Image (spheres, rainbow, N blue to C red):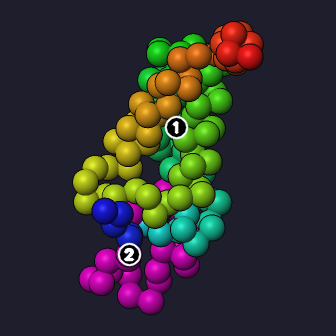
């Protein structure tokens, strides 16, 4: 079940919502998801600033620098395309991103040249 993120009703900053806030660094992850869903690239940049190093660190340890760069980019592109897939009731944004990274294991574990060789064997 996917949880749709919405702004808290008891906002202490009445009249100024997430979309009006020029400083995304003060926003919660839920606020970032709302802003990302509204196509605010600065919200994605803030999510990357907060969580990108962790994603990259795990990916680099598991698959090496080159694949880590690509996988980190893909994880955040997926977040940009599908912010509604994040269920903050189940886990934090960082945990969601790391889980998504773990699911790429089968694709990332095989480098493109190896994929080409495997495909050639099946022809």
Residue 2 screen position, x and y as percent: 35, 63
Helix, strand or loop at label 1? It is helix
- Residue 109 vertical position relative to residue 3 in the rendered view, above or below: above
Locate the N terminus and report the quarter of the image it occupies: bottom left
Q: Nearer the viewer, residue 60 or 78?
A: 78
Residue 114 screen position, x and y as percent: 67, 11
Q: Nearer the viewer, residue 94 or 104?
A: 104
Whether residue 46 is visible, yes or no, is no
State the residue lying farthest toward the bottom. Answer: 15
Residue 20 quadrant: bottom right
Whether residue 56 is visible, yes or no, is yes
Q: Residue at x 44, y 89 (%)?
A: 15
In magenta segment, residue 122:
no
Left or right, 41 with respect to 95, comes to: right
- Residue 29 vertical position relative to residue 112 in the rendered view, above or below: below
Residue 102 quadrant: top left
Q: Nearer the viewer, residue 17 or 107?
A: 107
Left or right, 55 with respect to 114, comes to: left
- Tell me the crowding category of disc 1: few under 14, some 14 to 19, or many 20 or more residues within 10 angstroms, Cα based: some
Q: Residue at x 38, y 88 (%)?
A: 14
- Residue 84 vertical position relative to residue 16 in the rendered view, above or below: above
Per the image, the residue denoted by label 1 is 52
Instruction: Please state which of the two labelled residues, at mark 1 or mark 2, is closer to the viewer.
Output: 2
Of labels 1 and 2, earlier in sequence is: 2
- Tell me the crowding category of disc 2: few under 14, some 14 to 19, or many 20 or more residues within 10 angstroms, Cα based: few
Q: Residue at x 30, y 84 (%)?
A: 9
Q: Residue at x 46, y 80 (%)?
A: 17
Segment colored magenta: 6-30
Q: Nearer the viewer, residue 99 or 55?
A: 99
Per the image, the residue denoted by label 2 is 6
């Amino acid at each position: 079940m996917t949880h749709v993120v919405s702004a808290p009703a008891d906002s202490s900053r009445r009249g100024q919502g997430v979309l009006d806030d020029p400083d995304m660094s003060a926003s919660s992850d839920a606020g970032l998801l709302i802003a990302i869903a509204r196509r605010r690239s600065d919200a994605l940049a803030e999510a990357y600033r907060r969580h990108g190093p962790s994603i990259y660190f795990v990916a680099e340890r598991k698959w090496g620098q080159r694949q880590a760069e690509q996988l980190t980019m893909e994880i955040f592109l997926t977040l940009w395309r599908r912010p509604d897939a994040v269920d903050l009731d189940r886990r934090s944004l960082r945990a969601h991103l790391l889980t998504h990274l773990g699911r790429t294991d089968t694709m990332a574990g095989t480098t493109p040249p190896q994929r080409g060789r495997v495909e050639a064997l099946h022809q």
